[in-house]
Amino acid sequence: MTTHTMAVTNCGGTTATLLMCVSAFIISVCKAHAAAPAVYVLGDSLVDVGNNNYLPLSIAKANFPHNGVDFPNRKPTGRFSNGENAADFLAKKIGLPTSPAYLSLVGATPPITGVSFASGGAGILNETGGFLFKQAISLAQQVDYFTVVHDKLVHQLGLSGAQAHLSKSIFLIVFGNNDWFAYFRVGSIVAKQYTPQQYVDRMVSTFKVLLKTLYGLGARKLVVTGVGAIGCCPIQRKENRTGECKVEINYWSAKYNDGLKMMLQGLKSESPGMNYAYFDTYGAMVNLFQNHETYGYTEIKEACCGVGNLNADAPCTPLAIYCPNRKNHVFWDLYHPTESVASLFSDLIYSGSQQFMVPINVEQLLAV
Ligand SMILES: *[C@@H]1O[C@H](CO)[C@@H](O)[C@H](O)[C@H]1NC(C)=O
Ligand SMILES: *[C@@H]1O[C@H](CO)[C@@H](O)[C@H](O)[C@H]1NC(C)=O
């Protein structure tokens, strides 16, 4: 891992450095002059690159076929996708390798180009992952893990070096979807304890406390995604006799997004030097459903990989069937977008207009 550190921090330097640029991705990092020193990823299955492979109790797993069917040798990696996900695409646009799963590092020095704490099934609220999939790394626990990485950075670079590094790094934070799946699932305990509005407030206030912790540790450039129109995922649609979207979960997801946007504005105003780019995932999904033909998608309801009604009666496993053309499907499995949609949304996040990126996009956030 030290060779990575040197190669990346001394790009274009001495012969020794060049000799260290042995592997293809390091060479590409050296050439590309990355727009940020690192990407730290906190999130759920939309950006998990393999942390859940290391969780013994979790039933949210994707390290088996047909996941990864569009990778070389059809390699399943733990990504909930036929190929890459939004974390991969965003890192590439910034000019960095994908941040590896924190749990895959097993004590090794984390690469200086970032780490991913994202975990399938994880929520903003501690209890969400357990309710849905028995085990996940909650946002609070991901922040705890980041604290460990932060301390290692301080050890490596000194306090001011670590602060300089973190202040230019991108923090990609993808959360909230699972909290709503947990609230609206059959037999939900939280729905008995809290009204939806109380739940919105709880999610937003918990999120704010944890973002403040990240700020306290030196994070200054946040990319935060809202909750999608998750009532339109195959698993939700199949519960509506008409095959249309579930109305209530969409309604409260959008309400939560309003609260999140206000919270981010407030957080920025009380946090000198902090900037953020918010992605309106909900709006982008609705726009995609309405104009799917223009984007080249012919199937917006049915999952590509799965079993039964809308291929949403079971997750994508080796026993499931999968569609021959992944490029014309919006959904890969009962919850997750195809690689193609992840790529489309990553383009919006990186350089899209204020239609879906407020107040700025990632390209602008990098330049702040
Ligand atoms: C959530 O879990 C974290 C540990 O990851 C703990 O520190 C925190 O107190 C918990 N929050 C609540 C509200 O239980
Ligand atoms: C099912 O879809 C229809 C049409 O969009 C909608 O009016 C209805 O409320 C939906 N049902 C549920 C349970 O969300």
Image (tube, rainbow, N blue to C red):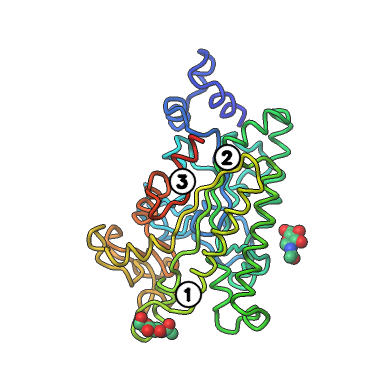
Residue 106, given in percent of the width and then of the height, sits at 66, 45
Of badges 3 and 2, the one in the foreground is: 3
Q: How many marks?
A: 3
Beta carbon at label 3 within 8 Å of ligand 1: no
Q: Nearer the N terminus, badge 3 or badge 2? A: 2
Residue 221, given in percent of the width and then of the height, sits at 56, 42
> Which residue of the protein is positioned furthest toward the bottom in this rendering?
241
Rendered position, 43 above or below 72: below
**Which residue is at the front of the view, 68 or 208?**
208
Rendered position, 120 above or below 186: above
Residue 340, given in percent of the width and then of the height, sits at 34, 54
Label 3 sits on residue:
360
- Mark 2 near mark 1, Cβ–Cβ under 8 Å? no
Given the image, on which type of amino acid does mark 1 rest? Tyr
Given the image, on which type of amino acid does mark 2 rest? Gly
Distance of label 2 from label 1 (alpha carbons): 35 Å
Residue in the picture at 47% in, 55% down: 79
Beta carbon at label 1 within 8 Å of ligand 2: no
User: Which class describes the residues within 10 Å of circle 3: few (<14), some (14-19), or many (20+)?
Assistant: many
Distance of label 3 from label 2 (alpha carbons): 22 Å
Secondary structure beneath label 1 = helix
Given the image, on which type of amino acid does mark 3 rest? Ile
Secondary structure beneath label 2 = loop
The numbered disc on residue 110 is none
Residue in the picture at 44% in, 76% down: 236
**Which residue is at the front of the view, 247 or 243?**
247
User: Which class describes the residues within 10 Å of circle 2: few (<14), some (14-19), or many (20+)?
Assistant: many
Of badges 2 and 1, the one in the foreground is: 1
The numbered disc on residue 114 is 2
Q: Nearer the N terminus, badge 1 or badge 3? A: 1
Give the image quadrant in which the ligand numbered 2 is located: bottom left
Figure quadrant of residue 118? bottom right
